[in-house]
Image (tube, rainbow, N blue to C red):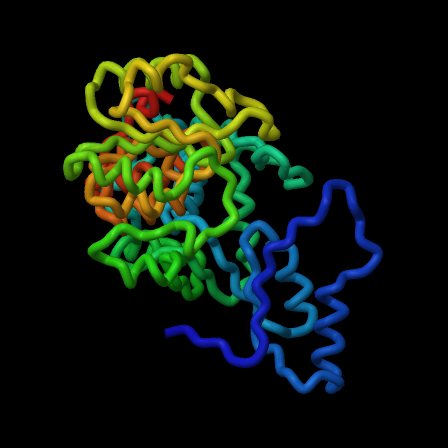
Amino acid sequence: MFILYNIIFFIILCPPPLQQPTTDPLSDYLSHASDGRDSSSIICVIVDDMMHQVIQTCLKRSIPAVTIFTSSACSAALDHATWKVQMEGSLVPGEERTVPGLPDDVTITLSDMAHVDRPPSPPPGIEGLPPPPPPLMRPPRIAGTDGSAAMLFNTCDDLERPLIEYLANEKCKPVWAVGPLLPGRLWDSLDQPIQDAEIRPGRESDVGEREVLEWLDSKPRGSVIYVSFGSLRSPSEASLAELAAGLEESTRPFIWVIQPKGRPGPGPVGYYPDGLAGRAGERGFIIRGWAPQLLILSHPSTGGFISHCGWNSTVEALRCGVPILAWPIDGDQFHNAKLVTARHGCGFMSERSRMR
């Protein structure tokens, strides 16, 4: 177990766009703490991978920095592997290229190249992030760890040991799994539904958790389809209309979480399937805004999850034993979906995602 004593910093702050601070608060603090005026001893700084510039500040003070990724090891490993395949030459349509050091069931395809060639724009409400790298440049998330002493990932060996070993070999430094970083109560309630409100209070929704629980209690075991694409992005409006038609025709009970209108950013966030709730009747449950996802996934009535494969949602579904129909939208979601479907066989990739 990797243990750090005394003071450990977890840096997750993103500065506002175009703002040039006149001082470096971290540098000032490190100077103060290392000149004998502070009784604490700083032995390490843990830096979020999005703030890798902080590493150089630490190195100037001869303080080791460790990079932490809140995403999967698979996403970092495949970003790096895809860059290496790009350097080797183009893939041909239909080719699934194996990469030395990666498991044979985790291959690189033209689809992976496409996701690298057109990286996602910053999520709504988040500006000032660095631009995507040009072709053939090392992914910034990986290049940014060059000065760090080690890498930490929000994952566990059972999920991603081969990917962790690949990164350790490629980067020539220790890589540790320190997750999954989920609420402790999730592990204490292995055989019963989890009350989200006790763990994540103060969320906005048009329904109460008790109402959701009572609806789930009324459905047969393993019968409910849960649909959620997270809070930042969504499939196209045409795709959502097809999904609504499919849920209506399936005759299966479902919970569909839809983000409310008025949220910042592009895309059809706020789409609402007009008339679906009435036509589905008691078979359908549509939630506007936040949903008690841990309750839904941990309830025995839930039998499947149509998901964008954000890492938190992916890990929560795997913990609860709910199979995933992967519908990734952008970013690391495609890599997470590959981990779930190709590596672990815990779900299937949607045909629409296969064509991207």
- Residue at 24% over, 35% down: 304
Residue at x-position 51% and y-position 25%: 269
Q: Quadrant of residue 305?
A: top left
* Coordinates of residue 157 in the picture (x, y in percent): 29, 59
Q: Name the residue located 44 percent from the left edge and 49 percent from the top edge.
A: 71
Residue at (70% x, 49% y) in the render: 15
The residue positioned farthest toward the right in the image shown = 22
Which quadrant of the structure image shows residue 239? top left
Q: Quadrant of the N terminus?
A: bottom left
In this picture, residue 47 sits left or right of residue 176: right
Question: With respect to residue 89, does 166 lie above or below?
Answer: below
Q: In the shown orientation, is residue 156 left or right of residue 273?
A: left
* Foreground pick, 147 / 153: 153
Instruction: Provide residue 81's location: percent of width, then percent of height.
Output: 39, 43
Above or below for 139 versus 191: above
Evaluate whether residue 28 shows in this view. yes
| The C terminus, quarter of image | top left
How many marks overall? Answer: 0
Q: Using the rendered image of the protein, determine whether residue 104 is visible from the camera's viewpoint.
A: no
Q: Position of residue 345 (x, y in %)?
A: 19, 40
Indicate left or right for 204 with 350 as reference: right
